[in-house]
Structure formats: C-alpha cells, structure tokens
Image: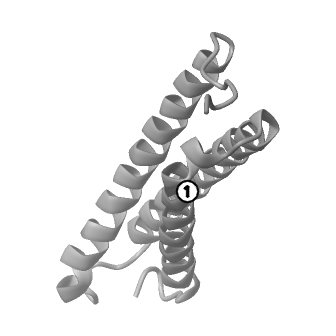
Amino acid sequence: MINDSTATCHFATFVGVMAFIGAAGLLVGEWFFEQFSSIKTRKHYVIADMAFSGIWTAFSLLCFLVLAYGWSQTNTTLYDYFAANIFGAIFFSIVSVLAWVSMNSNIALIKCKFHHGYFTEPKC
C-alpha cells in the first residue's frame, strides 16, 4: 500500500499501540502519584515518565517521517482509494508528536516544581 511495503504500516501500528499502552500506564501512575509515600519513588516515577515521553516523541516523529516519505514514493494512481486513510495516518502521527511534546513539557514543569518543594513527604 505505501510504496508496496507492509513494513511501514506495521511500524505505524506498533508505534500507535505501544503509545496507547504506555499512556494508559502513565495515567495510572498519575492517579496514584499522591499516594507514593517516598520522595525517591516520586522522583523515579517522574524520571521514568520523562524518559518514556521523550522516547515516544522520537518514535512518533520517526513514524511521521516514515509514513510521509513512503507515501511520497508511492504511485498514487494505483492506490487512489487508500489516500484518505493514509493522509489520516500521517496527520495523526504528527498530532501524536505534538501530544507527546506537550506531555513532556508538562513533566518538565512538574520537575521545576520539584526544586520548590513540590515533592514533599505527605502530611498525616
């Protein structure tokens, strides 16, 4: 479909599914964040969250580039009926990049608050 290669579609599917699973895991971590009793646990969670978000930003950008390049090399006259689906995949891959970047910058803001007493021991 994209440049007569199924690998491009499989890569995009892999990135999307793993991003969904990772985002669900991060959401669960955010839910329990206030219940972490140790400052080190909170710090490790924030570092893991930033690392995953940064890595997945790179994967999403790579996915966009692979899809866009693959589609530019495709003879569109043969695959005219797939065009809307491919454009949707390319659009949502770039939206994914923007979403992961905004999530990563939000975590950086939390990290900045870390130095101002945000990560303190819970008061009983």
Q: Secondary structure at mark 1?
A: helix
82 shown above or below 100: below
Foreground: 46 or 80? 46
Percent x, y of residue 113: 58, 17
The residue at the point 46 percent across, 67 percent down is 67
| Local crowd size for mark 1, using a 10 Å CA cut-off: few (<14), some (14–19), many (≥20) | some
The residue at the point 58 percent across, 84 percent down is 7
Percent x, y of residue 12: 50, 74
Amino acid residing under circle 1: Leu
User: On the image, which quarter does residue 47 sit in?
Assistant: top right
Residue 82 left/right relative to 89: left
User: On the image, which quarter does residue 98 sit in?
Assistant: top left
**In which quadrant will I find the N terminus?**
bottom left
45 shown above or below 77: above
Residue 116 left/right relative to 109: right
Foreground: 86 or 99? 99
Residue that lies at the very extreme toward the front in this rendered image: 124
- What colour scheme has been applied to the protein in the rendered image? one colour
The residue at the point 18 percent across, 87 percent down is 81
Foreground: 80 or 75? 80
86 shown above or below 105: below
Can you identify the residue that label 1 sits on? 26
28 shown above or below 79: above
